[in-house]
Each structure stands twice: as C-alpha cells, then as structure tokens.
Amino acid sequence: MPFDLRLVAYAPNGARLGILPHPLYIQAAWPLNDVPGLKFAYSAHAVGADLIAAPCEIGVQWSADGNVWTENGDGRFLRMLRRGDSLDPSGVWHFDCPSYLWMLKKAVTYAHASITPVNGQRVYGSPTPNATAGFIINSLLTEAQARGALSGFGWTFTGTLDTAGLTWNQTFGLGIPLGTDVLAVLLMLVDAGLIDIRMTGPRTLSAWRPGTAIFRDLTTGGNPVELAGGRDIRAAPDVGTLEDMASAAYVVGDASFRQEVTNVGTPLPWGRWETSVRQVGVSETNAANLVGSSLLVRGAVERVQRTRELLFAHNTRWLPLRDYLPGDRIYAPGEAGQRVALRVRQITLTRTDRGVAGGNLVLDDRLADNEIRLRRRIAHLAHRP
C-alpha cells in the first residue's frame, strides 16, 4: 500500500499556490486536544522553493494510492520559523510550522466594554458561576474579529451549542488575566476537562463537550480497527518507570490547609514512598482527597509509555488519518504482544527524501484515561474568578 505524504503551499488565508515536490524530510505530529506541528526541510534551489520564500500556509496531504490526496481538517500549518546557513551551498532551510490553530496566540483577552475588570482580570461567571467553555471562547473569538484580528479564522460552535449541536453543560466561574492570549485560554479549558477541540477545516476550529465526539470507540462493531504486528505495526517499544510510585500523598492547599492521603493497598517494593503537591483551589477535605488520590493512582503501578511504530506495506490494512484519529480507541499490540484496547494520544508521520513514509503512535490504556480524568477534575478546582 503506497501510503505517502506531500506538502502544498497556500497564500495566507488564501488560495493554493502549488505543490512542494522535493522536501528533504517531513515530520508532522497530531496530538490529542493540542496544537499539531510540522517540521520539514527544503532547498532554496529546488522546484517550488519560491512558494515558501514569503509567509504562507502549508497543507499536509496524505494518499493511500498515490492518486487521491487528502488534507485532513487539522492538516493546515503556518510557515512560521525557518533556519538556514547563508554560506551553505545546498541552500537548505529547516521550517517549524505550528497548526493554523496557533493563530489564536495573536488575539488576546481585552476588558469587556461594559464589565469592569477585577484585580486585572476579565471575570466570567460572577457572582453566579454560570459561564461555560463554549461561551468564553466564542465571546473572545467574536470580539477579536470585531477588532480586526483572526480575519480568516472560523469556528463551528456558539456560546450555547457545541459543534455537534449539544448544549454546553458544565458551568463555572473563571478569571482571565487581561492580555492572556486566546490559545492559552483555550488550552487551559482543555486541561480542565471543560472542552475538547480539533481543527476540522484548514482554518476552522470545532469544539465539543468533553468526552464526546472525538473520543470514538473503534473497537466495537463488526469491523473493529485492530493494528497487527507485522502488518500495521513494525515495532512496539515500551518504556517503563517506577519513579512516580508512591503510597502517601501530602496535599498543601490554600491558606494553611493540608492533608495526607494514603493508599494502604499499594505494595511498594521498598515500603512507604511519599509524594506531595501544592494545589491552588484546595481548601476542604473532599477536594484534597481528589488531588491526593490522583497522585496515588499514578503512583500505584509502573508507568509505561507505549509507542507503536507504523508499517506501510502492501498488506497494511489500517491507515492513520484515514481510519483512525487522535482520541480514538483502537486495538493494538500490548506489552506482551496481545490485542489490547488503547487510546490514540498522538499520531506522528514522517517522510524521507527518498519518499519513504513512516511514523508512530503514542497510546494510552484505561488506567491513563482515568488518570487524565482525575487531573482534569483537579485543574477545574483552580478555575475561579
């Protein structure tokens, strides 16, 4: 199966300029709920170099047959940073390109025209904590465009409904320091488990209630996605560490609040290991138990990072971007090579100067899913006006 990648240049917020036929390498990464990134190298002497001599956009396209090429919704990047040696006769330039989503760094939080800031912050959901993630981001985007920023940026949700048409249902209070860029606000809300995001068009952001649309389970049904060793997976390296193990957590919260949380059921090889955390927003027992328990969930077992190296061969069945995306649960070889249901946390794809495509997946198990949910609940504790 001749899976391949190519790069296409576009004018800023504009039309297609042309294909970049001779990249020296391509590396593109799509993390779940974060900003994708692209790296590539190109010679100033190669055909197409003139297309990227000035600020432009780069589309990453994939093909399963060499004929039909597709740019996924989150496949558009900004030609942002370039490095080269003026004395190098090869004229090679190396480019680091963030996703078009990075544009949100160039719009910042202004004071509302009719609401006085509190302690240098723009306050949402005060005195009643009734703000939602969708309302906050929609208002910041709308106001930025009214000022003339983000002119080419679009989004598919409103302050009331997410991209799937569901009502935003988590309300809270939040203070945003004036001048904070909109991307930082968005990622803070993601980390708190209040919103899921993905670019679904070259310049279009979609957002959903957390744990819904982008967390598909592709292990069900009559044709589950199952990556097999030797067919879809070339190698399955795991890296395990005991460094985070602990059976007692000391939680230090606001003012003089502090509490110990223990896990007596964790048999550690060297007996009691302690850990600690300072957490803004913790001032009572239930919250402290939540924070401490999250540390002990992480510390109860060896932590394993699962990377699966992709194989693109004539018999490869399941392809990244076409058949599965970050956030999907799929079957893949586990630590012992057996079939295990794992969450796709990141897809990284590469291409050499010889046109050989490769890449890898970063996968998480259900334990990591539970840990992330706990961390999101903890992050939510600190979000207050």
Image (tube, grey):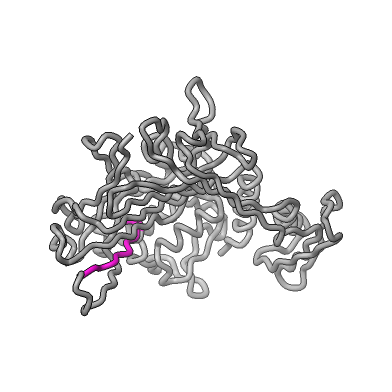
Residue 102, how many percent across, how many down?
35, 60
Residue 91, how many percent across, how many down?
20, 70
- Quadrant of the rendering where the C terminus is positioned: bottom right
Residue 245 vs 163, above or below: the answer is below
- Quadrant of the rendering where the N terminus is positioned: top left
Residue 329, how many percent across, how many down?
53, 37
Q: How many marks?
A: 0
Asked if one can make out residue 113 in the rendered structure from this viewpoint, the answer is no
The residue located at (19%, 74%) in the rendering is 89
Q: Please name whichever residue, 262 or 306, is drawn nearer the observer in this view of the structure.
A: 306
- The range drawn in magenta is 91-101
In the displayed image of the protein, which residue is found farthest to the top? 222
* Quadrant assignment, res 165: top left
Residue 351 vs 314, above or below: the answer is below
Q: Please name whichever residue, 206 or 263, is drawn nearer the observer in this view of the structure.
A: 263
Q: Please name whichever residue, 13 or 274, is drawn nearer the observer in this view of the structure.
A: 274
Residue 376 vs 177, above or below: the answer is above
Residue 146, how many percent across, how many down?
27, 60
Q: Is residue 93 magenta?
A: yes
Q: Is residue 12 left or right of residue 139?
A: left
Q: Is residue 301 magenta?
A: no
Asked if one can make out residue 292 in the rendered structure from this viewpoint, the answer is yes
In the displayed image of the protein, which residue is found farthest to the bottom? 87
* Quadrant assignment, res 101: bottom left
The residue located at (32%, 61%) in the rendering is 97
The residue located at (41%, 55%) in the rendering is 137
SS assignment for the magenta stretch, majority: strand
Q: Is residue 382 left or right of residue 151?
A: right
Q: Is residue 245 left or right of residue 319?
A: right
